[in-house]
Structure formats: C-alpha cells, structure tokens
Amino acid sequence: MKILISILITFTLTAQSLAQETVTITMANVFGDTPEGRMPGHTGRIQQFIAKKIDHHTNGQVKWEILRGKQQGGVSVFQSPSLTAKGDIIQATNVPAFFLPRVPEVMIQSIPFLFDGAEHSRRFITSEPAKWMSRKIEDAYGVKVLGHFHNAAYVSVNGITPIREPEDFNGKIMNGFDKSWAPMWSNVTPKEIRFIGTQEAWTGALVNPGSDFDINIGMIQNNHRQRLHERFKHTTLVTNFYNIFYTMMINRDVWEGLTDFQRTGIEKAIAEAQDASVAYQLDTTLWALQLNQSEGVEMHIQTSAERERWKAEFYPKMVKAVSDRSSNPSETLGMIKKIEALVDDLRWQK
C-alpha cells in the first residue's frame, strides 16, 4: 500500500510539473516602436492586454511574446500569416484585412457605412459573419484564428479646402487609403489618386515643399506624426467609412499541442480583449481628435445628413466590388446582409 501511495504521489507531482511547463508563443504584428511623446496605438495596447491576460488565465503557463519594431528583423508583415503556418520563426501573428490577400471577402470591412456605430462593431466580432470570415482565413493560410479586434472606424479626410460632400473630391489630387476603394470613384472623379505609404508619409511626403496633394484620406491617429497640419488645414472626421478589424492567428500544431487548460485560458483572454478593443479604439480616436485641433486644424465631424449622401454615393459600389471579387458572390452578399442586421434591434430601441 505504501509503495502504491508513493507511486501515486510521484505520478501526481510529475503531472503537475509537466502541466506547468512554460510555453512561449512568439507573435509578429504590424507595429513598430511608439515614437517618444506619442500616445501608444490602441491595437498595440490591446496586444499587451492580451499577453497579460493570457499569463493570468493560464497561471503563467503560456508566455505571449510580442515582437515590436526592430525585434521583428526579417519578418515581413505580408509573409507573417504564412510564417505562422510554418511555426518555426513565429507561432502567431496579428494583422488587418489588407495583409490577407488570399481572402478577398475580408475586404467587407472596407465597405463605407456598412457599420453603424461602436455597438454594431462590437456585435460583429463574435457574429456568424466573423466566424465565416475566420474559417476562410484558416483554410487559405493553414492557421487557427483566435479572434478579431476592432482597430479603426474613423476616417480622417484632410483637405486644403473643406471636404463636406462627395462632389468635393472632383478634380482633386488625392492620397487614397487603399486601392481596394478604386470602384467607388466611378461617379465622383478625383483628378488623380496616388497611394503614399505610411512609412513614406512619416518622412513628410504629403506636406514637404513641392507637394501638390489637395486631399489625404487616412487614420486620424496618423495625422500628427505625418505632420498633416502643415498643409491640410481642414479635416472632416467620417464615422464608419470603414471598420477595420485585426485578425489574430496561431500555428495549428502549437494550438493543438496546448493543454485544454491553456487553450481555455487563451480563449478567455481573447474574449476579454475583443470587448476592450472597441473602447480602446474610441479612446485613441478622441486623443487624436483633440491633438489635431490643438495644431490649428479646423475639425468638422460629419453630420447625419452628409453621411446619408456619402453612403448613397459610395456604399452600393463597394458592396458590388467586394462581392464580385469573392469566390461565392451570393454567399458574400448574404453575409453583408447579416452584418447589416446586427444593428436592427439597436435601431428599434432608438
């Protein structure tokens, strides 16, 4: 009996030791180091939130190591989903829709005015369309999708003159946000649309002497670092011109190799971070708005009437463009309708 008890104690202690063995998961992302004096980006903050919550909910058994700035070395953002599937350099990644070209359906997020506010965005995160999108990403990249996090809903339309109506874009030289928006400029026709990347814009490409840009479309959080106030004295803040979500994914073998307790802890951390991401995004937007105002920019928040006119012009064109690019247009149109329906009961309550 004593021998049996001794064996059981030894077995229990050994099992506990194995269960508590630390697993380190290295995650790549699109974020560099935060410049001195600038408020950290909300998605970077959410990632730190996730890392802390994973450590907490797994009792320290899983360490979520986030590569930032120079730490990422030769890991290309566009390669990170595929590198995650291999799992030798990185085991996880967190990227927005623009870095998942194998799944054109994720560009649903770029449809102007599909979403109708922060609560609508929050409901999407765990909705059937979000799960449908996750499955497509998993099939295309051979990864396990952990969740989606809200990143941006406010577009900053910066102009050397006020931009209030769709026709105000006519005849202007514009820096566009993304080439996926090209189909919506069929009636409203800027003189020229260019695409200056974020890194180039940080060096002053939009505002340096010789710049001929009339309009810039981008994230309001980037305005200060890109020094846009030096040239563009008018900004229209457009709510839900897009709704960008970051997708966090993990190597399948790594995920399957975790214990049930570890997976449950990660899932709990992800769920808490998804809810928090909506508030974090609003927090940073308000900070960026007041910073732009303090730099002498005339800030105009788009009115409801203006929104309806913009939506009538741009929304149907982008719905058609996104569905036409998908592998199953009718299915994609159905999912767009389901995203629209997520807000129906909110409208009833109003």
Image: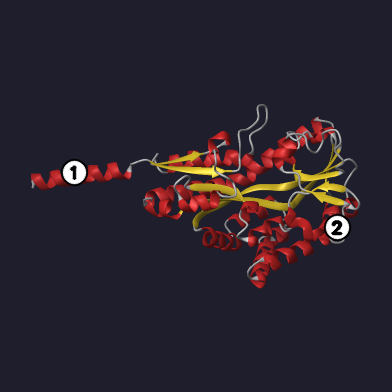
Q: Residue furthest bottom?
A: 330
Task: Check the picture and name the quadrant holding the C terminus.
Answer: bottom right
For mark 1, does the 10 Å Cα neighbourhood hold few (<14), some (14 to 19), or many (20 or more) residues?
Answer: few
Sequence-first disc among 1 and 2 = 1
Secondary structure found at label 1? helix
- Residue nearest the observer in this picture, 225 or 305: 225
Residue identifier under label 2: 309
Relative to 276, is 283 on the left or the right? right
- Residue nearest the observer in this picture, 269 or 100: 100
The answer for how far apart the CA atoms under marks 1 and 2 are is 72 Å
Q: Residue furthest top?
A: 37
The x, y position of residue 346, in whole percent, is 69, 58
- Under mark 1, the amino acid is Ile
The x, y position of residue 312, in whole percent, is 83, 61
- Residue drawn 72% across and 43% down? 197
Residue identifier under label 1: 9
Residue 340 visible in this rendered orientation of the protein: yes
Q: Are marks 1 and 2 in contact (CB under 8 Å)?
A: no
Secondary structure found at label 2? helix
Image label count: 2
- Residue drawn 87% across and 43% down? 214
For mark 2, does the 10 Å Cα neighbourhood hold few (<14), some (14 to 19), or many (20 or more) residues?
Answer: few
Q: Which mark is residue 121?
A: none
The x, y position of residue 337, in whole percent, is 68, 66
- Under mark 2, the amino acid is Arg
Residue 112 visible in this rendered orientation of the protein: no
Vertical order, 194 against 70 (above or below):
below
The x, y position of residue 163, in whole percent, is 88, 47
What is the quadrant of residue 320 in the picture? Answer: bottom right
Relative to 163, is 331 on the left or the right? left
What is the quadrant of residue 334 in the picture? Answer: bottom right
